[in-house]
Image (cartoon, coloured by chain):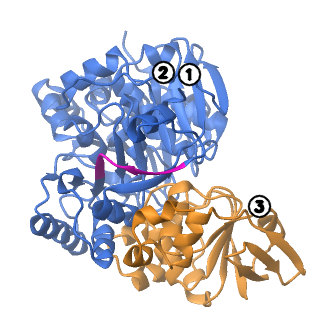
Chain colours: A orange, B blue
Amino acid sequence: MGRAWKFGDHVSTDEIIPGRFNITTDPQELAKHVFCEVRPEYAERVRPGDIVVGGQNFGCGSSREHAVIAIRNSGAQCIIAASFARIFFRNAINIGLPVLECPEAVAGIHDGDEVEVNPATGVIYHVTTGKMFQARPLPPFVLKIVSAGGIVNFLREHDLEELMHP
Amino acid sequence: MGTLIEEIFSRKIGRHAYAGEILLVDVDYIMSHDNTTPLAIQTFQEIGRPIYDRSRIVLHLDHAYPAPNVQVAENHRRILDFVRQQRLPHLFIRGVCHQVMLEEGFVVPGAIIVGADSHSNMYGAVGAFGTGLGSTDIAVAWATGKCWFKVPETIRIELYGQPPPGVYAKDVMLDLIGRLGMDSAIYRAVEFGGAYIDNLPVHERLVFTNMSTEMGAKCGLVAPDDRTIAYLESETAARGPFERIRPIRPRYERVIEIEVSTLSPRIACPPDVDNVKPVKEVEGLEVHEVYIGTCTNGRYEDLEIVARILEGRRVHPLVRVIVTPASQRIYTKALRNGLIEILINAGCTVTNPGCGACVGRHGGVLAPGERALTTMNRNFVGRMGSPLAEIYLASPATAAATALTGRITDPRRIMRG
């Protein structure tokens, strides 16, 4: 179970991690500055297992993977959004950070609410109200990447072609 | 048979590719730059495999070059050491990656080019599939030569008419983004066509495909035609024969038709790129910096528009006017033809080619409370430095007019004959 950190529509990767911090590839260093301008208290107060909740087009803009790394290493267990920008979505999957598309859950969840998520099934349990939501299921080959903990881990055991096997 | 993107994928896999299908395909080139390459190197080393084909890897130093601080210098060092260790043949320090990719001949009709940069969509102006990816996808492509894609559905945008003087591709594209919204094409290909696009020079078509990213698109495309081929032959190192890939009995998810003959200059206001208004509505707002350049509008023809407006005049004394040519090739052509001298005499600061102030780390960052008008493609909070600065996006002509007055100005007031 985690607490929801709710954001609005069109949160850009510039807002997740401003360009001036992209000079490092150190995940912990990136995590220190995540959301520093739009939600300065986030990095300090986020707890392991918390959930980032975004609106439409979450993660739009620059392709910088620093953004998903910063969120993952902040301790957030997953991101729920009404929709994701495509590069951000891929980047999250590739590093094994679950991303769930569920506009209904986003509409129902408020900042600070308690939420339980099962990334494998896409079931979102809104503890605060007792409501259940079902996120759009991830395609099977995407689930393979997520369950391996990211594409790098997947490639350690498999060939890329195996992603396409039914 | 299919949309342009289906046709491109079909050629690649040797059978018909359908929208919605997930494919693992060979990529022709894998592009990355100094901002995204260090992470890709780190991930590549974690994968622990050798490079699949070094001739497909193209690296650029453009986002913060020359290095403005020690950390960036360390990143450049890591990249250059990697190039040496891996004996990579394609390293460029010649300006903004996308412009250089085109000039150096990597971008041709039908090519699949992935870039660790969101504006890789630009390559679609000549009928290539260019798309942005993160550093992990890039590292995987280095190691395997491949990438997975879902063949996207296509939104076809038909543009008709001829815009009046003072109105450019940038204005038309900003207007489109304003009408459709910055998430209107997520996961979609956007095909630009119609009489206006058919008659448009390639350097302006590039504005449309570049900023298809600002609609959330996976790629922006224009079917290659005679103009495309003439451009590739005269302006780039690419040599034909080039494939004239066209949509064949396509099924579009949506077709949008827009008449551009009555359009006036447009401007995207903070904090989002789809907050687009006629320039007239915000005229008179004081600006502190005018920034002209980038992969969107830093080409020779853009500098020419600016120079024509500024020739024999002086920019406002309290406005920092910074011009960054997109590439060395553009820079030298502008020097040869006297544009740089005109810009400098008018009071502009001309910097070395590259991404400049657009990445918010060097070359003209903004202080809190400042307002900039720029020819860039995005105006997110904090993009150019302080999150308390405001960024307005417009055409090179609007930028030049604004540079003269120090206030946002409709270029039609200033333009000569």
| Residue occupying the point 33% across, 17% down | B227
Q: Chain of mark 1?
A: B
Chain for numbered disc 3: A
Q: Which amino acid type is marked by label 3?
A: Pro
Circles 1 and 2, Cβ within 8 Å, touching? The answer is: yes
Q: Which residue is mark 1?
A: B264
Closer to the eye: label 1 or 3: 3
User: Label 3 vs label 2: CA separation?
Assistant: 39 Å
Amino acid type of disc 2? Val
Residue drawn where x is 19% and y is 22% of the image: B234
Q: Nearer the viewer, mark 3 or mark 2?
A: 3
Q: Is residue B329 above or below residue B50?
A: above
What residue is rendered at 57% in x and 39% in y?
B18
Total number of numbered labels? Answer: 3
Q: Tell me the magenta residue range.
A: B22-30
Q: Residue B222 at x, y = what percent? A: 44, 27
Q: Do the residues marked 1 and 3 share a common chain?
A: no
Residue B246 appears in which quarter of the rendering?
A: top left
**Numbered mark located on residue B167 in the image:** 2
Q: Chain of mark 2?
A: B
Residue B396 in sight in this render: no
> With A70 as the anchor, is B404 left or right in this view?
left
The residue singled out by tag 3 in the image is A103
Of helix, strand and loop, which one carries label 1? loop
